[in-house]
Each structure stands twice: as structure tokens, then as C-alpha cells.
């Protein structure tokens, strides 16, 4: 026991409480102290703006320019934060203790669909992009972009963080605008080719397949329809239907019959 953990003299029960605390519930890392709210509006006070009409117009137009810039930066930062935090957590849920998702679901796909209404492809995109975007956030002051992270994922996985920094340095040396294609080209010039990685069973099923344009359109429409059905299921589950029928039996029953008829039609389409 370190000196800081020793109970102060004369305080009965402190040692017992300390020993009990060592066998209490597992600790959770404390969340970082909240920063200033980036969404808090900071409007210009019209009453405080003085000068000629032209000068006041310039002040208000500058405020709009700042607002547009802030909105763009804030949204990018919010997207990047979501990818890093959600992707890191999804990876842990998938991998730790043989799969924490098994506490509630048989497969990882079942878990992400039921718990987060997310398809498998999107979940793996977040998982793959999260560590890269975390590294990217250390390199630049601006928010990292997910499409850039996907290109850099094999570079980080195969060659480490220094290689990611080298790719960005190569682009800066040439004065190139940072785009996914520019990143890919810089990585190729440096010899950081994609490193083949043996995918898991779930990942093999999620690998993209080449399709004709008509096949691709059909798949997109099916995915859109599935997303709409999931939304309808969320809207109708629980006591929505019985409560609606109880509130207005005639109208509620008519709506329920339409729902059942539509569900039957969809079921026939899926056969």
C-alpha cells in the first residue's frame, strides 16, 4: 500500500472501506472534461454594431461567413469523432472475450442490426477507419476524413504510424490537395502497397463483389427498401398497434389490416 492509500490516524473504518473498494464493481474510465460547447451560438448583437450602412452590412456578412465555416468544421469534427468512438467500441464488442455481442445475440451481424440498426458493411467500415482516423487526428489540426482513412488503413496496418506520416509528408512536399486519390498515389510512390490480410468469416461475406450497373441498382434499391422496412418496424413495435385500435377501433383496425396486407405482399416478394 502506498503512502497515499494509508488511512489517516484516528479515522475508524477507513481501512475497511478502502479494502472493500478494491472488490467493488469494475471501474469505467472517466470521460474527459467537457470542452466549450461548439454548438453554442455566438451571434453578433445588432445593437452593438455601429458605423455606416456599408460598414454594418460588412460586419453582418462577415458573421455569416464565420457561421458557415464553423458549421462545416463542426460537422466534420462530429463525424470524425463518431467514427473513432463508435468504431473502437464496435471492434471491442466484436473481438474481446471471443465476442461480447454473444451475451445478447448469436452473431455480430445480428447484434449490430438489432442493437444499432446498422448493416454489417457499415460496421466494418467504422471498425477499419477508427484507428487510422485516430492517428490522422494527431497529424493535423483539422478533422480527419473517413474516405481518406479507408485508403490509409492498409498503410497503417502493414507499416505503422510512421508510414502514414510519411505519406502525408510526401503530399505536402508536392503541394498536392489531400484527396483519397492523392493519398493512394503517394502511398504507391513510397512503396506502401496494400498488405494482404486474411479476412475473418464475417469479413469474407462482406467483401465487395463486382456487379453490372443493373445489378448494382437492384441491390441499392433493395438496401433502401430494407432500411425503410426497419424504420416501419421501429415505428410499429411495442404497444403502438393495440393502443391505436383501443383509441379508435374502426379506424385502427382498418390501418392494421393495411399493414398486414402490405406485410404479406412483401413476404411474397421475398420468396
Image (tube, grey):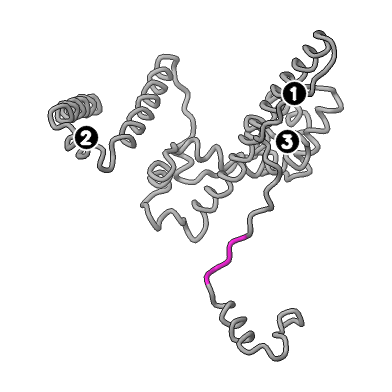
Residue contact at pointers 1 and 3, CB within 8 angstroms: no
Q: Secondary structure at mark 2?
A: helix
Q: Nearer the viewer, residue 135 or 20?
A: 20
- In the rendering, which numbered label is found on residue 55? none
The relative height of residue 130 versus residue 211 in the rendered view (above or below) is: below
Q: Secondary structure at mark 1?
A: helix
At 55% across and 50% down in the image, what residue appears? 89
Q: Nearer the viewer, mark 2 or mark 3?
A: 2
**In the rendered structure, which disc, 1 or 3, sits on the residue that comes first in sequence?**
1
Residue contact at pointers 2 and 3, CB within 8 angstroms: no
Alpha carbon separation for disc pair 1 and 2:
48 Å
Magenta region: which residues?
Answer: 25-29
Figure quadrant of the N terminus: bottom right
Q: Residues within 10 Å of mark 2 (few under 14, many from 20)?
A: some
Residue pointed to by mark 1: 66
Q: Nearer the viewer, residue 157 or 240?
A: 240
- In the rendering, which numbered label is found on residue 244? 2
Side (left or right) of 250 relative to 214 = left
Query: Is 26 inside the magenta-drawn segment?
Result: yes
At 47% across and 40% down in the image, what residue appears? 204
Alpha carbon separation for disc pair 2 and 3:
60 Å
Q: Nearer the viewer, residue 234 or 8?
A: 8
Side (left or right) of 162 relative to 143 = right
At 80% across and 9% down in the image, what residue appears? 53
Q: Position of residue 9 (x, y in %)?
A: 72, 90
- In the rendering, which numbered label is found on residue 192? 3
Q: Secondary structure at mark 3?
A: loop
Residue sitting farthest toward the top: 54
Figure quadrant of the C terminus: top left
Q: Nearer the viewer, residue 258 or 139?
A: 258
Amino acid at each position: 500500500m502506498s503512502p497515499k492509500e494509508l488511512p489517516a490516524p484516528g479515522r475508524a473504518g477507513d481501512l475497511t472501506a478502502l479494502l472493500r473498494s478494491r472488490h467493488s464493481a469494475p471501474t469505467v474510465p472517466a470521460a474527459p472534461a467537457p470542452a466549450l460547447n461548439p454548438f453554442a451560438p455566438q451571434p453578433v448583437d445588432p445593437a452593438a454594431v455601429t458605423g455606416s450602412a456599408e460598414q454594418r452590412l460588412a460586419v453582418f456578412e462577415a458573421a455569416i461567413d464565420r457561421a458557415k465555416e464553423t458549421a462545416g468544421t463542426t460537422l466534420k469534427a462530429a463525424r470524425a469523432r463518431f467514427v473513432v468512438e463508435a468504431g473502437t467500441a464496435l471492434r471491442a464488442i466484436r473481438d474481446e472475450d471471443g465476442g461480447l455481442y454473444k451475451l445478447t445475440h448469436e452473431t455480430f451481424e445480428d447484434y449490430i442490426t438489432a442493437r444499432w440498426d446498422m448493416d454489417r458493411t457499415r460496421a466494418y467500415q467504422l471498425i477499419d477507419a477508427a484507428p487510422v482516423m485516430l492517428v490522422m487526428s494527431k497529424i493535423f489540426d483539422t478533422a480527419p476524413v473517413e474516405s481518406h482513412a479507408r485508403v490509409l488503413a492498409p498503410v497503417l496496418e502493414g507499416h505503422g504510424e510512421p508510414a502514414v506520416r510519411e505519406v502525408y509528408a510526401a503530399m505536402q512536399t508536392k503541394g498536392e490537395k489531400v484527396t483519397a486519390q492523392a493519398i493512394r498515389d503517394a502511398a504507391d510512390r513510397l512503396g506502401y502497397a496494400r498488405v494482404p490480410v486474411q479476412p475473418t468469416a464475417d469479413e469474407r461475406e462482406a467483401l465487395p463483389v463486382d456487379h453490372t450497373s443493373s445489378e448494382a441498382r437492384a441491390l441499392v434499391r433493395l438496401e433502401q427498401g430494407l432500411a425503410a422496412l426497419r424504420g416501419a418496424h421501429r415505428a410499429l413495435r411495442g404497444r403502438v398497434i393495440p393502443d391505436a385500435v383501443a383509441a379508435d377501433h374502426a379506424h385502427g383496425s382498418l390501418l392494421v389490416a393495411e399493414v398486414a396486407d402490405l406485410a404479406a405482399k412483401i413476404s411474397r416478394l421475398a420468396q
